[in-house]
Image (cartoon, rainbow, N blue to C red):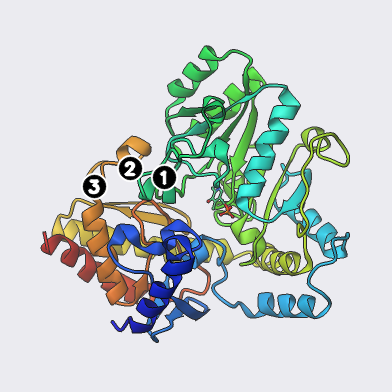
Amino acid sequence: MKTQKSEYLFERAKERIPGGVNSPVRAFKSVGRNPLFISHARGSRMWDVDGNEFIDYVGSWGPMILGHAEERVIEAVTKAAADGTSFGAATEREVELAELISTMVPSIEMVRMVNSGTEATMSAIRLARAYTGREKIIKFEGCYHGHADAFLIKAGSGAMTLGIPDSPGVTRSTGNDTLTAQFNDLASIQHLIDAHPAQIACLIIEPVVGNMGCVPPRKGFLEDLRRLCTEHGIVLIFDEVMTGFRLAPGGAQELFGITPDLTTLGKIIGGGLPVGAYGGKREIMKLVAPQGPVYQAGTLSGNPLATAAGLATLRILSQTPTLYAQLEEKSRSLESAFTSIVGKHCLPATLNRVGSMFTVFFTSTAVVDYTTAKTVDTGIFSRYFNHMLERGVYLPPSQFEAAFVSTAHSEADIRGTADALEQSMIGAFDSL
Ligand SMILES: *Cc1c(COP(=O)(O)O)cnc(C)c1O
């Protein structure tokens, strides 16, 4: 694979940008190579500056559920741009988007638009603290909720990949207010609640984890959490930045039939532009300024481009009834290909999948939480990743991330990927 142009850009980038990238996992550090610089993408395909073509399963880390440069989304953004990119004033699209979000995710009675998932989660915990008059929060080891200080404790995603789940620069007092539990382990939460009576403002969770790789909740786990939170007056926050509009029109909460108090959104809701949102029960949301005293603001929040892209994307998702069944079918055929390859060659690897989110873990242990996720062999992952890339399949360059299937992936893409998968799995273990 030719990479001269990417190498040259990376040399220049490293001089002026920390690590040469504007978000850590883009650096490909954990897979032992330098990053590719992307020039353009369309549908399921992505091209780098050296002209290499890939079937893309990163999908901008989640947003591109309709594939890249979807015609109707691009048209909506282009039209909006021509009318002015930002006014810092109320617009009609913001009202339409808020109404559509409430329709698709009924637990969201009121919603506030922000500019990223990070902003959504940090605002949601401020609100939960104000609502309960309590200070502590519970999160799960290996879950990632953006890069705000309160969440960089046993964090997943890039922090986990780079081995820095607890970041320097986060103060001890902030760290003390973040309690961590084990995913899928109710006793670990009960223990924290007992140890800190009436001090826990909220519990925040990725209802299906994507950020230590894909890890589904065990049967009944989310129900148990809902019951515990209600019993103890704890605000239950579903961080659906990744799962929202991905697993169902109404996200993981629709799929599992659980009603959280607050929900955070991002990724798909922006249709590829920088957007986030948080919303939920009216009784809680009415505390947000200017209706209430909890301050939160944003110069570019709800701007015309972001809301145009978001509206176009959500309209397609809500108006295409067969869309999620088709995503499921394509993702399932990838999973069956994997299962038969692993069976045929007796390979110690396992695949977790919920809908169009999946991760291949290089371990023979079932991955159900942070501890089991850490049993993987990242060296084998790295070889597998590089084999796939050389065969034209672009996966997340980390063992602790989810890959995504989009509506633009064709049957032929899936078959091609299954072939590359077989050769790459064999190659990854052969070179041992
Ligand atoms: C990506 C992600 C975030 C952070 O969103 P940004 O837009 O990157 O700030 C938060 N929570 C979850 C579950 C995510 O997947």
Rendered image quadrant of residue 36:
bottom left
Residue 46's spot in the image, x, y percent? 46, 78
Q: Nearer the viewer, residue 330 or 390?
A: 390
> In the picture, which quadrant includes the N terminus?
bottom left
On the image, the x and y values in percent for residue 188 come to 44, 23
Q: Residue at x 33, y 53 (%)?
A: 399
Q: Is residue 383 above or below residue 47?
A: above
Tag 3 and tag 2, C-beta contact below 8 Å: no
Q: Say what amino acid the circle numbered 3 marks.
A: Thr
Task: Using residue 430 as the reference point, say whether residue 43 is left or right of it.
Answer: right
Q: Which residue is mark 3?
A: 363
**Front position in the image: 309 or 165:** 165
Q: Position of residue 123 (x, y in %)?
A: 69, 41
Q: Horizontally, is 213 left or right of 113 in the view? A: left
Q: Which residue is mark 2?
A: 373
Tell me which amino acid carries mark 2.
Answer: Ala
Whether residue 211 is visible here, answered yes or no, is: yes
Residue designated by label 1: 215
Task: Kindly report the distance in space between the C-alpha atoms of the residues bearing marks 1 and 3.
Answer: 14 Å
* N-term-proximal mark, 2 vs 1: 1
Dot in front, 2 or 1: 2
Label 2 residue SS: helix
Asked whether the beta carbons under mark 2 and mark 1 sit within 8 Å of each other, the answer is yes
Q: Residue at x 29, y 61 (%)?
A: 31
* Residue 327 located left or right of residue 123: left
- Name the spot of residue 207 as percent of width and height, x first: 53, 41
Task: Identify the amino acid type marked 1.
Answer: Val
Q: Residue at x 31, y 72 (%)?
A: 389
* Residue at 49%, 81% in the rendered image: 39
Using the numbered discs, state the Cα–Cα distance from disc 2 to disc 1 in whole angstroms.
Answer: 9 Å
Secondary element at image label 1: loop
Mark 3 or mark 2: whose residue is earlier in sequence: 3
